[in-house]
Amino acid sequence: RAPLKVAGFTIKAMGQSTPSAMNNNTLTATLATNVVLEKGTYISISGLTGTLTPDGPLPLSGPDAATFSGTGYWRLTPGIMVFPVAEQTVANQSYVVSFRVVNSPVGQDPPTVLIRASRTRPVGAPVLQLTEFDPVTIGESPIVSATGNARPLLIASFTTDMDSKAIGQITPHAFSENTITITLGVQSAMPPGAQLTIRGLTGSTTPSGLIPLRD
């Protein structure tokens, strides 16, 4: 081994499949280190708050799931995913692994997600009988998030600004034509085809059907 070579992540990126509340969400991590990760090293990704997924083992997917034993160990509080290195890695080679959680019904900004590697078994992770190997320790540091709606655990909602979900009308007069004006602000990008539903608009004689919208 090279003298005074300090272990570190050269790639530490993460994204998600959807920001939609109450939906299954696949989180994908891409990792690489400047050293070989020996068997028995535990990788921990923390700060993954805003899910409904209970504590327990979660299946890993992706091209390199087997390198990390095919199973991760999840704790809802404080939002941490741990997976052990089951096969020795190659320095500076990228590894991609995914796991699925369920997004909370409550919208949120993306949390700060951290990653580390350690030889100490985190709570909930299995005991590895691999004493002939030398696990690697890498200090905790922020993971690099994807952009836009792919930012991990960005959960869609209307923004909290006072005017971000407002509705008004131009007249209260009976039997008069009335224009309803809606102002909306959203926390995440809305793709083409997304639908907004506004309920409770009772008291109108307008028949069911399509209504043209205007700015």
Image (cartoon, helix red, strand yellow):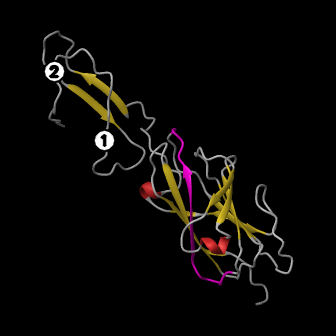
Image height of 169 relative to 151, above or below: above
Indicate the amino acid at tag 1: Gln
Which structural element holds mark 1? loop
Residue at x 77%, y 90% (from the top left corner): 1
* Front in this rendered view, residue 167 or 62: 62
Which structural element holds mark 2? loop
Q: Is residue 130 visible?
A: yes
Please give the range of residues in magenta: 89-106
Q: Residue 138: x, y in percent?
A: 73, 71
Q: Residue 27: x, y in percent?
A: 54, 59
Q: Is residue 208 toward the left or the right of residue 13 in the image?
A: left
Q: In which quarter of the image is residue 40?
A: bottom right
Q: Is residue 177 toward the left or the right of residue 37 in the image?
A: left
What residue is shown with label 2?
A: 206
What residue is shown with label 1?
A: 195
Distance between the alpha carbons at the discs numbered 2 and 1: 21 Å
* Front in this rendered view, residue 143 or 39: 39
